[in-house]
Image (cartoon, rainbow, N blue to C red):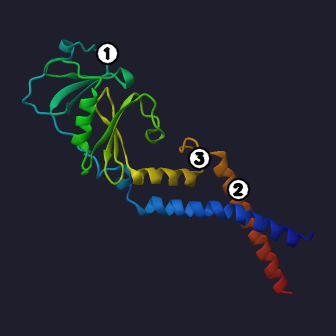
Amino acid sequence: MGKALFWRRTHRVLALIVGVQALLWMASGLYMTAISIDVIHGDHLAHTHRPALSDAVPLKAPAAVGIAPDEALRLKQWQGRPVYEVGKGPKARLIDARTGAVLSPLTRETAQSIAQALYQGDGAVESVRWLTDAPQEVGTRPVPLWQVRFADGVATTLYISPFTGERLATRHTLWRAFDVMWMLHIMDYRTREDIGNPLLRIAAGLGLLLTLAGLVLSFWALRGRGR
């Protein structure tokens, strides 16, 4: 088999393999750039502002409500009241800064009330679930957590921390499609996070070989015409 025939066959095989992935790269890239990242994040579906604390409300000192000096502490406005957010992760808790009452872990009713206050769509609450295993769409966010799903056209779902009362994530149909496109784009079909995974490197390497094979064929074609 001559060199020219070898390179032509190599080029065809590589074009078939790389071409499919190149199509996925272009389609996924188009989707990810055509839709605003703010829409993907769901900023239009849930409030993102934080209410300011009122200086007129008398507060109890942290020590007076059982907060140790070495504990992580944050004062914030939550559900219309000032609260202390104490600790981090699963050990975090909310304490009413006026009365000292412990407010967490949140009940189902409280989680639903928070989600409804944050939600800016027009759908009713479809389900409220207590999750001890985080679904893939919330990644590595701490569990357990509350999942509140709304019956709207984009399946809006808010994830609420039962310990801090914070919204951990907003998910909807466009975000889920973006997640699939991102998976196809970086070729990480397991965690959808590793942009340096072996499959992507192999595809990039094959793409380079495809280009080199094309250059070799072009060189021979031009040399043949010059004779």
Q: Quadrant of residue 96?
A: top left
Q: Which mark is residue 33?
A: none
Residue 118 in the image: above or below residue 63: below
What type is the residue that disc 3 sits on?
Answer: Asp
User: Which badge, 3 or 1, is on the more N-terminal residue?
Assistant: 1
Q: Residue 79 location, x and y as percent? A: 18, 33
Name the amino acid, label 2. Gly
Q: CA distance from mark 3 to mark 1?
A: 41 Å
| 63 lies left or right of 59 | right
Q: Which residue is mark 2?
A: 205
Under circle 3, the secondary element is loop
> Which residue has dot 1 on it?
70
Q: Of the numbered discs in the image, which one, if any, rests on residue 188?
A: 3
Q: Disc 1 vs disc 2: which is toward the camera?
A: 2
65 relative position to 196: left or right: left
Q: Are the residues flagged by discs 1 and 2 in contact, CB closer than 8 Å?
A: no
Q: CA distance from mark 1 to mark 2?
A: 52 Å
Q: Nearer the viewer, residue 173 or 178?
A: 173
**Left or right, residue 12 beside residue 161:** right
As displayed, is residue 49 above or below residue 205? above
Sequence-first tag of 3 and 2: 3
Q: Quadrant of residue 125?
A: top left
Dot 1 falls on a residue whose secondary structure is loop
Q: Earlier in the sequence, mark 1 or mark 2?
A: 1
